[in-house]
């Protein structure tokens, strides 16, 4: 009788230790996803912080491009007003955030195409430095998004695999959404439209 109680007690302790290990692993992976979200937001913010300097530099040369400059400033304001909350991340909130960022990317693209019409500006060292920094920001954004996708894949795989899915279900761990490319990004740009 005493051996049976010891065996049952040992099995219960083993099950608790096993459950705690799985729970802690899920928490660590969920924190990795939160960190990745923060890195993406930081990369986008760095790009947004460069935009006022870029707009000011272009404004000094491109007096007749007020509409393009205004569109960039407005898109930046919209993009910086939308944030992601890692604790309450949904596909809808992620889509809203990415739509704002994509709108800013589009406005920046139009600005950079406009700059092609101003040879003096293209030769300006301040503009060249800003353009180089902007390119670095775009690379940082791409890397942060890739790391985000990897963190989400690791976390979602853990949440869905047996037996971790039991612990995940008991404690409310849910799948995290992936970044998805916008519909505009799926299509090649129409070069004729950019230069008309």
Image: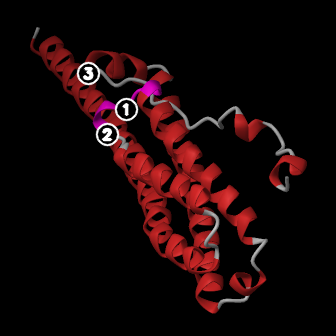
Instruction: Report which residue position mark 3 lands on.
Output: 171
Q: What is the chief secondary structure element of the magenta stretch?
A: helix
Evaluate if marks 1 and 2 touch, with contact meaning CB atoms under 8 Å apart: yes
Q: Which residue is mark 2?
A: 85
Label 3 crowd (10 A; few <14 / some 14-19 / many >=20): few
Circle 1 packing at 10 Å, graded few (<14), some (14-19), many (20+), is: some
Which residue does the image show at 37% across and 32% down from the upper left? 89
| Farthest-out residue, bottom | 125
Task: Name the side, left or right, on which 48 lies relative to 71.
Answer: left
Determine which residue is flagged by label 1: 89
Q: Residue at x 84, y 47 (%)?
A: 193
Q: Nearer the viewer, residue 126 or 195?
A: 195
Q: Which residue corresponds to the image point at 73% horizontal and 88% vertical from the top-left? A: 123
Q: Earlier in the sequence, mark 1 or mark 3?
A: 1
Relative to 78, say whether 23 is above or below.
above
Query: 113 or 102: which is nearer to us?
Result: 113
């Amino acid at each position: 009788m005493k051996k049976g109680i010891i065996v049952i007690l040992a099995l219960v302790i083993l099950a608790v230790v096993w459950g705690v290990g799985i729970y802690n692993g899920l928490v660590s992976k969920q924190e990795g996803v939160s960190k990745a979200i923060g890195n993406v937001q930081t990369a986008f913010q760095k790009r947004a912080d460069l935009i006022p300097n870029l707009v000011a530099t272009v404004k000094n040369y491109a007096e007749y491009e007020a509409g393009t400059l205004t569109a960039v400033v407005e898109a930046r304001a919209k993009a910086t007003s939308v944030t992601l909350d890692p604790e309450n991340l949904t596909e809808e909130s992620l889509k809203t955030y990415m739509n704002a960022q994509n709108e800013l990317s589009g406005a920046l693209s139009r600005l950079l195409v406009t700059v092609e019409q101003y040879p003096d500006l293209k030769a300006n060292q301040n503009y060249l430095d800003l353009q180089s920094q902007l390119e670095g920001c775009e690379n940082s954004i791409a890397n942060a998004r890739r790391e985000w996708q990897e963190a989400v894949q690791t976390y979602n795989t853990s949440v869905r695999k047996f037996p971790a899915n039991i612990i995940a279900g008991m404690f409310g761990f849910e799948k995290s959404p992936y970044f998805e490319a916008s519909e505009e990004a799926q299509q090649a740009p129409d070069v004729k439209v950019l230069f008309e």
